[in-house]
Image (cartoon, helix red, strand yellow):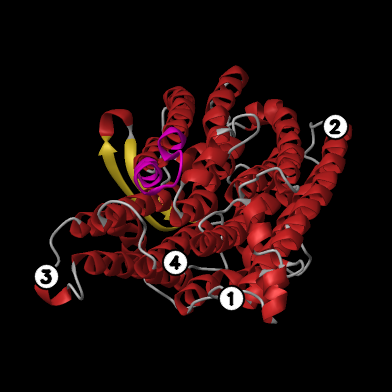
Amino acid sequence: MIDISESVMQFLLAFIVVGPLIGAVAALLPAPPGLRGTGPDQAVLRHGVTVTGAILAAAIALVIGFDHDQPSKMQATTDISWIPALDVRIHLGVDGISLPLLVLTALLSFLCALYSYFKPPTGPSPKAFVALLLVLESGMLATFAVLDLVLFFLAFEMVLIPMYFLIARWGGEARQPAAWKFILYTLLGSVVMLLGLLLIGLQSGTFDMVALATDNGRGLTASTQVIAVLAIGIGLAVKTPMWPLHSWLPDAHTAAPTVGSVLLAGVLLKMGTYGFVRIVLPIAPEGMQTFAPYLAAFAVVGIVYGSLACLALAKQGAGGDLKRLIAYSSVGHMGFVLLGIATMTPTGVNGALFANVAHGLITGLLFFLVGALKDRYGTADLDTLAGAAGAALYGRAPRLGGLLAFAAVASLGLPGLAGFWGEMLALFGAFDPAPGLNRPAFLVFMVIGGFGTLLTAAYLLIVVRRVCMGTPPPEDRRSGAPAAIPDVRTYELVTWSPLVALTVLAGLWPAVLLGLTDPAVQKLLAGGKS
């Protein structure tokens, strides 16, 4: 990679975190006359594309300048005292664990802004929409870049308000109750998490995540660690979401606008699992070991529950909403991530991090595709789609049908695509969990997780069969051609192609991602020792 000076790397990371906030303020100001285009609405949507594009460019530059020979080392670090009385610091940095999530967030934010430029959301002023999208991006990026427990909590909470308004103002049917359910669940979980973070900081005398990870729980008693893991784990589990704290997710996804669903599934769910890896595993290992079997049990129940819910929604006559089905599938997929973390092994944690990124790419693509279907048919109801398009996408819009089938087989974990590696490594981790964990119990969890993969394949193949395949309706057969609907448009192809390409790349060349995460995970689990 190219050698970029440390000061430039520090600036790039600071710009990635703060840049969207500055862009959000600018979005609310009147556009200069020469930049308005056909009107102020187009100007502000173009502003969103420009700002998110600049952040993505900075993230790519950060990857280019990142020392790939030392991915376990915190790089591009900034460490400035902020609240001396509490030893709270503005501490930023990235390593092999956070860098892929940072880039994924920047990419999905840019693709959402680009999609919104060509397909503006239905609702109030685009100015507020773009400003909220940029504030949301800043909070998501900050979550993966900060290295102070108080800053982590602030960034973790910063995403709630913009996502609430995106659902409540630009969402579909039942958007108000869904938005309220989203914010109440996550706020209540966060209050409990804050108590756990404060307990760790006050007991150890520092909120610095790097120092705490290096200390590896030696400054905290076993009882303190157990209480802290329970409190922090509840807050993180709500955001993940872990069964049975998941019930806000299907409603939020069903009501959210397309780009809201993409960012909710692609990034917000990852903030919870990232917190488990970055905070709970290294800072309170004894407490984590106490709760690991329970976390694994909840994870595999979530895998099976999510799959069974999807099967129920997918069957004929169930009136299942396709967005709701994909939301339930996320509960199952995030169950694999939690199972990998619960094994407390490098194999399992690497699998969890890989599955995080793969889920962001694949589910982001799925929500884009379902949004496109809803635009064309006016509904995401599976029975309606199977009836109206039941001969269907392969004949009426072959490229759209092909992309939906591709995303489905990637989501079910087909070898050679990104969805395969994370789930496989999580199951391998469960086969041989960390010393001190009950191996027979984890073998049972592994078997249940493996059964969940079969259920996943079943419901996704049913969806593909019902929406993409079938016999043309009689009126279409008389005309001799399938009823035409618009196939993939140019802007959709541009927006979705990076997700398709990265899904294939990560599936065929997993070492690109695992080469970054593995050294950092090894160091994290070894108590800060490389």
Q: Amino acid at mark 2?
A: Ala
Disc number for residue 204: none
Residue assigned mark 4: 111
Front of the two marks 4 and 1: 1
Position of residue 104 in the picture relative to residue 305 (left or right): left
State the separation of the CA atoms marked 3 and 4. Answer: 25 Å
Of badges 3 and 2, the one in the foreground is 3
Q: In this figure, which residue is indicated by the disc labeled 1? A: 484
Disc assigned to residue 32: 3
Q: Is residue 287 left or right of residue 375?
A: right
Residue shown at 41%/72% (left/top)?
A: 61
Residue 424 visible in image: no
Q: Nearer the viewer, residue 315 or 446?
A: 315
Q: Is 180 left or right of 529, judged from the image as shown?
A: left
* Mark 4 residue type: Leu
Task: Kindly check if marks 2 and 4 are in contact, taking CB atoms under 8 A apart as contact.
Answer: no
Q: CA distance from mark 3 to mark 2?
A: 64 Å
Q: Position of residue 341 (x, y in %)?
A: 68, 42
For residue 139, above or below residue 407: above
Give the magenta-colored segment's residue range.
162-178
